[in-house]
Image (cartoon, rainbow, N blue to C red):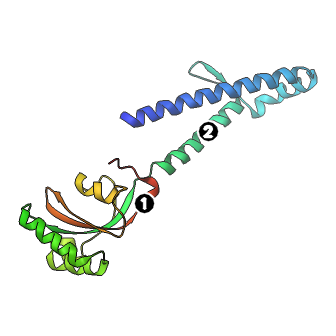
């Protein structure tokens, strides 16, 4: 079932298709008027039409074969465009998690951030030493590639927010897990969806 924005997008798409069908039918009517000037050509076209262009009725609307072809091409083009622009935003990031929300923990992470600067290797070393997340011990805090919607909102605001630069250590950021330092390695900038 379609919900919310997808339903609205689908309805808009159907409305656009109906407008295109109307325009194509008008063009066909004008073309038929010109063809009527030459009776033999019109007669030959009409006699051959059942072989290659069949008329269909769709929800009470008579559609010519040309219109069906145009409709299919438009639908396919629409799907290609929709799929191209609806891919999920992705990022690659690492973090250091301290699973405590005290002021002391915040200050500890600020001190760690100062030691790291923006050096990815120092970040990985500090994650292995200090992070309470399993990713810290095994892979230097790396979370790998993930998409928008897979992390908690405060974390995503940093990772996908345009005001947070790639290659910079951000934080401390508080979530219900505790405090994080976040290093964004890569972000799909062209599909930026987060509104700050």
Q: Residue at x 56, y 21 (%)?
A: 59
Local packing at callout 2 (Cα closer than 10 Å; few below 14, some 14-19, many 20+) is some
The reply to whether residue 98 is in sight is yes
Residue receiving disc 2? 74
Q: Does residue 112 appear left or right of residue 120 in this picture?
A: left
Q: Nearer the viewer, mark 2 or mark 1?
A: 1
Q: Does residue 110 appear left or right of residue 59 in this picture?
A: left
Q: Does residue 172 appear left or right of residue 148 in this picture?
A: left
- As helix, strand or loop, the secondary structure at mark 1 comes to loop
- As helix, strand or loop, the secondary structure at mark 2 comes to helix
Identify the mark at residue 188; answer none if there is no mark: 1
Residue 73, image x and y in percent?
A: 64, 41
Residue 98, image x and y in percent?
A: 13, 68
The reply to whether residue 144 is in sight is no
Q: Are marks 2 and 1 in contact (CB under 8 Å)?
A: no
Along the line of sight, the residue nearer the viewer: 104 or 49: 104
Q: Residue 159 is drawn in which quadrant?
A: bottom left
Q: Residue 100 is drawn in which quadrant?
A: bottom left
Position of 26 relative to 1 (above/below): above
Sequence-wise first label, 2 or 1: 2
Along the line of sight, the residue nearer the viewer: 113 or 61: 113
Residue 60, image x and y in percent?
A: 59, 18
Position of 41 relative to 161 (above/below): above
Along the line of sight, the residue nearer the viewer: 147 or 187: 187
Local packing at callout 1 (Cα closer than 10 Å; few below 14, some 14-19, many 20+) is few
- Residue at the far top in the pictured view: 60
């Amino acid at each position: 079932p379609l919900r919310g924005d997808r339903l609205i997008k689908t309805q808009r798409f159907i409305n656009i298709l109906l407008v295109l069908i109307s325009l194509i039918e008008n063009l066909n009517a004008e073309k038929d008027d010109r063809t009527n000037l030459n009776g033999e050509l019109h007669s030959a076209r009409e006699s051959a039409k059942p072989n290659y262009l069949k008329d269909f009725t769709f929800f009470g609307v008579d559609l010519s074969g040309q219109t069906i072809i145009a409709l299919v091409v438009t639908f396919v083009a629409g799907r290609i465009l929709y799929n191209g622009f609806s891919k999920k935003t992705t990022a690659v990031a690492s973090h250091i998690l301290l699973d405590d929300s005290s002021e002391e923990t915040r200050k500890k992470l600020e001190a760690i951030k100062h030691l790291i600067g923006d050096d990815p290797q120092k970040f990985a070393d500090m994650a292995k030493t200090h992070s309470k997340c399993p990713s810290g011990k095994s892979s230097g805090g790396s979370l790998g590639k993930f998409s928008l919607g897979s992390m908690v909102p405060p974390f995503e605001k940093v990772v996908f927010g345009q005001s947070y630069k790639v290659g910079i250590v951000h934080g401390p950021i508080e979530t219900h897990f505790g405090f994080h330092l976040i290093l964004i390695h890569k972000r799909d900038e062209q599909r930026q969806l987060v509104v700050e």
